[in-house]
């Protein structure tokens, strides 16, 4: 149980350090294994970045709310259930901003790898 809590806490701590990479329920695992890796998209509109910033605020609130719930879970199954619940809530936040999960993840990737995108997003926060 302790190892699970440490693992979950570490995972949530990683989320705290940057944008969340949400998973679309309809996305197949094979999508991530495409043959060629291309440079991340960086030509996002201001509207897309504003939606990303708004979604990120909601995601941070969900992360904060669920971190303590997951840490105090009685067992591994409950902790995993809470983690899935948090992920589902995060997906809802992203979609409520009119964004597709793929677009959100593309911006998050660019935020972490492209200084210009990071500057643009940080200036909107």
Image: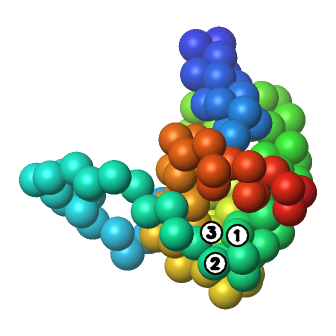
Q: Nearer the viewer, residue 19 or 78?
A: 19
Residue 101: x %, y % from top left = 52, 71
The residue that label 2 is drawn on is 45
Residue 56: x %, y % from top left = 77, 59
Q: Secondary structure at mark 2?
A: loop
Res 54 quadrant in image: bottom right
In this view, the mark in front (2 or 1): 2
Q: CA distance from mark 3 to mark 2?
A: 21 Å
Asked whether the viewer can see residue 62, the reply is no
Q: Is residue 70 above or below residue 53?
A: above
Q: Secondary structure at mark 1?
A: helix
Q: At 24% across and 62% down in the image, what residue appears?
A: 31
Q: CA distance from mark 3 to mark 1?
A: 17 Å
The residue that label 3 is drawn on is 91
Of the image marks 3 and 2, the number of the one nearer the N terminus? 2
- Give the residue furthest to the front: 116
Of the image marks 3 and 1, the number of the one nearer the N terminus? 1
Numbered tag placed on residue 49 in the rendering: 1
In this view, the mark in front (3 or 1): 1
Asked whether the viewer can see residue 17, the reply is yes
Q: CA distance from mark 2 to mark 1?
A: 6 Å
In this view, the mark in front (3 or 2): 2
């Amino acid at each position: 149980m302790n190892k699970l809590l440490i693992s979950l806490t570490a995972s949530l701590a990683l989320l705290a350090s940057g944008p969340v990479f949400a998973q679309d329920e309809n996305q197949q695992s094979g999508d991530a294994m495409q043959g060629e890796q291309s440079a991340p998209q960086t030509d996002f509109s201001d509207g897309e970045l504003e939606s990303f910033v708004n979604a990120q605020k909601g995601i941070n609130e969900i992360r904060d709310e669920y971190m303590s719930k997951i840490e105090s879970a009685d067992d591994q199954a409950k902790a995993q259930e809470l983690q899935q619940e948090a992920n589902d809530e995060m997906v809802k936040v992203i979609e409520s901003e009119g964004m597709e999960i793929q677009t959100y993840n593309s911006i998050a990737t660019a935020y972490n790898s492209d200084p210009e995108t990071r500057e643009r997003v940080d200036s909107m926060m």
